[in-house]
Image (cartoon, helix red, strand yellow):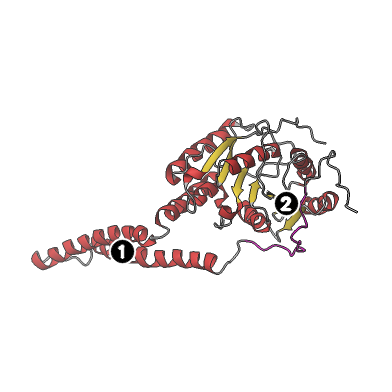
Amino acid sequence: MNVLPIPASGLPEGAVMPEHKLSIVIPMYNEADNVEPLLVRIHQAMENYSQPWEVVLVDDGSTDATPAEIRRLAVVYGPHVHGVELVRNYKQTAAMQAGLDAARGDVIATLDGDLQNDPFDIPRMVYRLLTEDLDLVAGWRKNRKEGFWMRRLPSRIANRLIARVTGVQLKDYGCSLKVFRGSVIRSVRLYGEMHRFIPAWLATVTTPRRIAQEVVTHHARIHGQSKYGISRTFRVVLDLVFMFFFLRYRTRPGHFFGGIGIVLGVLGSLILAYLFAVKVFLGQDIGTRPMLITGFFLVIAGLQAITSGVLAEMLSRVYLEANGALAYVARPQPAHGEGDGWNWPSKPATEKAKPRRK
């Protein structure tokens, strides 16, 4: 079933993987044909992995047989393959947050469910994350197997714009293959369609010096259809505006909205002062002048920018963060014990049990 070649591990010769537990989180939407090949590929990649690991497959309200395939294969492979089913399509960011919430590892890897990301890159990225004491290793699809005009060129422009605005210098923000330190990624919450800006979100809780990128393999899609189109460019621009505000003014939103309000208020006040002088000192009629309405409008708009904007933004963040509100609703899943649901590495065949003392 798996037609992709089996690459080398990519780890340095004699490398010893530090102790950890790894969770692999994969959001999926209408990927029924990819579920089984993906799990085959993951198990091939992790066959000789020396640490416990699990797979969390998140069905984002698929309308095809994806949830049934996840349930079937979870039984086939065992308890280290978990399924999370969202009751409707909440989009990729909420699905990824659902997977992060369900993941139990102290290292978390994320990738797409379309087999374009290669799980064989995960061990190498995890090794780098742990040995170099990083918080994030992001994949870089240096040789993308996609069209230039509709996919690679818009992505290249977006990557440069995002890096310029956020200050986190990565060449490929759109690559879903990333490896995180669990304690760090759990300290942020993802809303809307902010999965593209996860490195920038992490920069709010850690230093960009602990964020690195790694060249990864990128395959052409084999099954299914891409869920992305040129329309996502407009959503990226809107999300980038919010990201700029959040990174620069999260702790001082009054400076952002206050700056806009002051500019509008000053312009309106100058117009009204001019009209006042014209009326008092020159005796001219100002009641029918458009400048009068413009002046009052600018003053009122300035007051609204200072008050309504700040209150709305702060109240939304308080609601989402302080109250622990989630951006998704998932069906209940059976709880796992501390030692259940992990694919523990088997002991080497040469290791034999020690004889008991009489």
One can see residue 233 in this view: yes
Q: Position of residue 80 (x, y in %)?
A: 77, 52
Give the residue number, with chain letter if any, for mark 2. 57
Residue at mark 2 to residue at mark 1: CA–CA distance: 52 Å
Q: Is residue 226 magenta?
A: no
- The residue shown at (85%, 39%) is 349
Above or below, comparing residue 8 to residue 291 in the picture:
above
- Between 182 and 334, the one lying in front of the other is 182
- Please count the marks in the image: 2
Prevalent SS, magenta region: loop
Q: Quadrant of the C terminus?
A: bottom right
- The residue shown at (30%, 62%) is 298
Mark 1 element type: helix
Give the residue number, with chain letter if any, for mark 1. 297
Is tag 2's residue or tag 1's residue first in the polypeptide sequence? Answer: 2
Task: Count neighbours of disc 1 (C-alpha within 10 A) and say few if under 14, some if 14 to 19, many if 20 or more.
Answer: some
Q: Position of residue 14 (x, y in %)?
A: 68, 33
Mark 2 element type: strand
Q: Amino acid at mark 2?
A: Leu
- The residue shown at (70%, 44%) is 113
Q: Is residue 355 left or right of residue 54?
A: right
- State which region is magenta: 328-344
Task: Count neighbours of disc 2 (C-alpha within 10 A) and say few if under 14, some if 14 to 19, many if 20 or more.
Answer: many
